[in-house]
Amino acid sequence: MENKATIFDFQAEVGLTKQLGGLKTTEELVELCHIDQGKYVLDVGCGVGLTPCYLAKKYGCRVVGVDIRARMIDRAKERAKREGVEALVEFRVADAQDLPFDDDLFDAVICESVIAMVPDRQRAVNEYVRVTRRPGGYVGVLESTWLKTPPPAEMIEWVGQDLSGNAQLLSADGWTGLLKDAGLSDIVARTYPIDARNEAINTMKRYGLRNLPRVWARSLAMYIRNPASLVTIKRAGSAPKNLFEYFGYGIYVGQKMEGVPTRGAHPVARKCDIGPPDPPILGGTAALP
Ligand SMILES: C[S@@+](CC[C@H](N)C(=O)[O-])C[C@H]1O[C@@H](n2cnc3c(N)ncnc32)[C@H](O)[C@@H]1O
């Protein structure tokens, strides 16, 4: 099998992954998925662990992050330690299409800029729904979206090249359809255009200035060790001129209600070290028999 480095191997090495829209879109997912302190959250394709650590720190909720790349998970664990949130987050290697968790486990499953790269997107979304609590848990997806269809063939090709991990975008109707077909209800879909300059600023804000020197130092060290390691980036060539007329992103959130059939329960579900929080102790005295 060909062993070709992708942009994500590079990002794992330097410790920087990105989604679209920055913290503002993460916050929108938080709001739409009703994430707060008492919640148990799964972040699929967590990359270097920025969102799980952010959620644990800001909301005090418990978060499990998974990514298909072991190196991303190493970086995520380093981040949790640096940020002092190890007691609230857990990271492990897993494929979005085959999540090693029990059914109905998480209050919310979120996924930022991942499923466009997953070969069987419907299977991945079915998995998100399977591990979400019923009734009432939420699945929230942030994903690159064709805002205008059909996009020119050369644009589809450019977006799908290795640089972006073979991304295959859908329109908002396409992404919404995946959530509906997985059995989710009350779907909210919001789309946004991309402003390249804001994206760069959003990424800097998301990481914080104090984290960026580490990323630059690692990139430089990588280049000095092996100048060919940056070839993946160079190969991309320049973006099509009217890219952002077509290429944007969307937030898609749905709720899992009773009656959603469970598809493909995982045979080797393993208990998480960071489990759900204890149920709240309700005030007052319970009626004694
Ligand atoms: C664009 S990055 C986004 C990372 C992270 N969500 C963030 O916001 O920074 C995409 C991530 O998805 C991961 N990924 C790709 N395919 C995956 C799969 N099948 N299962 C789990 N993770 C996957 C990549 O390794 C990468 O870390």
Image (spheres, grey):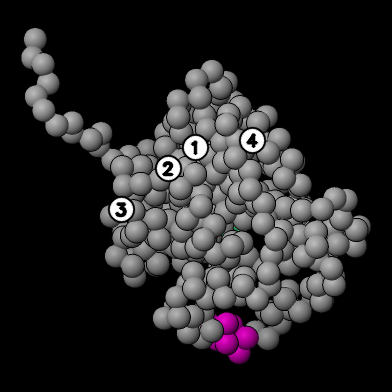
Q: Residue under label 4, please give it.
A: 179
> Within the image, what quadrant is residue 35 found in?
top left
Task: Residue at 46%, 47% (x, y): give it.
Answer: 31
> Measured along the vertical axis of the image, is residue 100 above or below residue 209?
above
Mark 3 or 2 closer to N-term? 2
Q: Is residue 56 left or right of residue 75?
A: left
Q: Residues within 10 Å of mark 1 (few under 14, many from 20)?
A: many
Task: State the mark number for residue 138.
Answer: 1
Q: Earlier in the sequence, mark 3 or mark 1?
A: 3
Residue at figure coordinates x 63%, y 65% from the top left = 8
Q: Which residue is mark 2?
A: 34
User: Identity of the amino acid at label 4?
Assistant: Leu
Q: Is mark 4 within 8 Å of ligand 1?
A: no
Q: Which residues are magenta?
A: 218-224
The answer to if 220 sits in the magenta stretch is yes
Please say whether residue 44 is visible from this viewpoint.
no
| Point 56% across, 22% down: residue | 260
Outermost residue toward the top in this view: 289
In the picture of the structure, the residue carrying the numbered disc 3 is 60
Helix or strand or loop: what does disc 3 sit on? loop
Q: Nearer the viewer, residue 191 or 68?
A: 191
Residue furthest bottom as drawn? 224
Q: Label 2, label 1: how many angstroms apart (C-alpha)? A: 8 Å
Q: Is residue 152 left or right of residue 168?
A: right
Counting from the top left corner in percent of width and height, residue 227 is at 68, 86
| Residue kind at label 3, given as amino acid type | Gly
Sequence order check, earlier mark of 1 and 4? 1
The amino acid type, in three-letter code, at marker 2 is His
Which of marks 4 and 3 precedes in the sequence?
3
Give the image location of residue 280, x and y in percent: 23, 35
Q: In whole angstroms, how far apart are the C-alphas of marks 3 and 4?
A: 28 Å
74 in the magenta segment? no
